[in-house]
Image: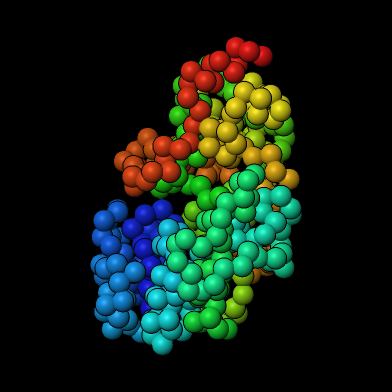
Amino acid sequence: MKLLVMGGTWFLGKHIAEQAVGRGWDVTTFNRGRSGTDVPGVRPVHGDRTAPDDIRRLAARGPWDAVIDTSSSDLAPRDVLLAASVLKDHAARWVHVSTVSVYQGWPHRSLTERSALLECPADADDSYGYTGEGGSPTAYGFQKAGGERAVEESFAGRAVILRPGVILGPGEYVGRLPWWLRRAERGGRILAPAPGPRVMQPVDVRDVAEFALGQTEGDEAGSYNVAHPDGISFKRFLDTCLTVTGGTGHPVWVDPEVLTAHGVKQWTELPLWRTHEGVWSVDPSRATAAGLRCRPLPETVADTWAWMQGKGRPVPHPRWNEHGIDPVKETAVLASL
């Protein structure tokens, strides 16, 4: 198998490249060479995917059996369209990593692949879209929907779209799970969002990588929601964080109304906490039928802690600083209860 990975030096892209090399595949990676390091065994090509000359230079290194695109997160649809339109004659298949944010109903309603998508042209620039008053829809969701359209127009009948919600695991750069692990390690009374039994559906980055690689083979096209079929309750998640870190703290479960009254921000100040009904109601049955296999999430928590305790360091990213409540604010909320 000859594979091109758009990205390939950090988090999901790195895991995909490592697993593909481990399978004995011929792997080319394309990135700017600024974040992370090239995986041993790949054929690295460095360039800017928004530059037509760089994309044409990349195309000359083909052909490939498949492309896996992990690096379109911050790109406008027209930039995704540039790469897809140039590479369509140099690759048989395109596996595109998108997001559940492309759905009109996320995070308010339960989702399947038949749920309506946001509308965005394939050639839109980065000004297209808006963020709603309640934080939904998001400009990000519109942009990613346009990126999906760009791929599907260029690789008609040959495109696979993966729509994960939250990806956790070793190498995470966003900082959600690492923040909870550090908070558990610190101990004391831990502000926790009730209800504890509520189930979340994050997926392990290594399982997403394996599923993406599986979708490079065969001839099925279409889209897949990539979410954990079993999930994990918030209580078990925090208990696992405490266990693996050896933390001596204990969670204090606080109702959402109280947290909101104290101005605690969902999704960022308490990572993974969001009250919307559909945020953790994503149907992954199509993906599981196509081969998605998800390890138990306590294993993800433990392995991420091991990575953090070893030589693991995340690639610097501004989103890391968005996550986690200030200790002074947390103490004040707890003292008011």
Q: Is residue 225 above or below residue 253?
A: below
Q: Position of residue 307 (x, y in %)?
A: 39, 41
Q: Is residue 50 above or below residue 219?
A: above
Query: Is residue 42 in view from this perspective?
Result: no
Residue in the picture at 60% in, 79% down: 220
Query: Is residue 263 in view from this perspective?
Result: yes
| Total numbered labels | 0
Residue in the picture at 50% in, 40% down: 176
User: Quadrant location of residue 5?
Assistant: bottom left
Q: Is residue 16 above or below residue 156?
A: above
Q: Position of residue 76 (x, y in %)?
A: 44, 65
Q: Quadrant of the N terminus?
A: bottom left
Q: Position of residue 237 (x, y in %)?
A: 60, 36
- In the rendered image, the residue lying farthest to the top is 335
Residue in the picture at 57% in, 33% down: 265
Q: Quadrant of the C terminus?
A: top right
Front one among 297 and 23: 297
Looking at the picture, the colour scheme in use is rainbow
Front one among 232 and 337: 337
Looking at the image, residue 4 sits to the left or right of residue 108; the answer is left
Looking at the image, residue 68 sits to the left or right of residue 291; the answer is left
User: Quadrant location of residue 44?
Assistant: bottom left
Q: Position of residue 213 (x, y in %)?
A: 49, 69
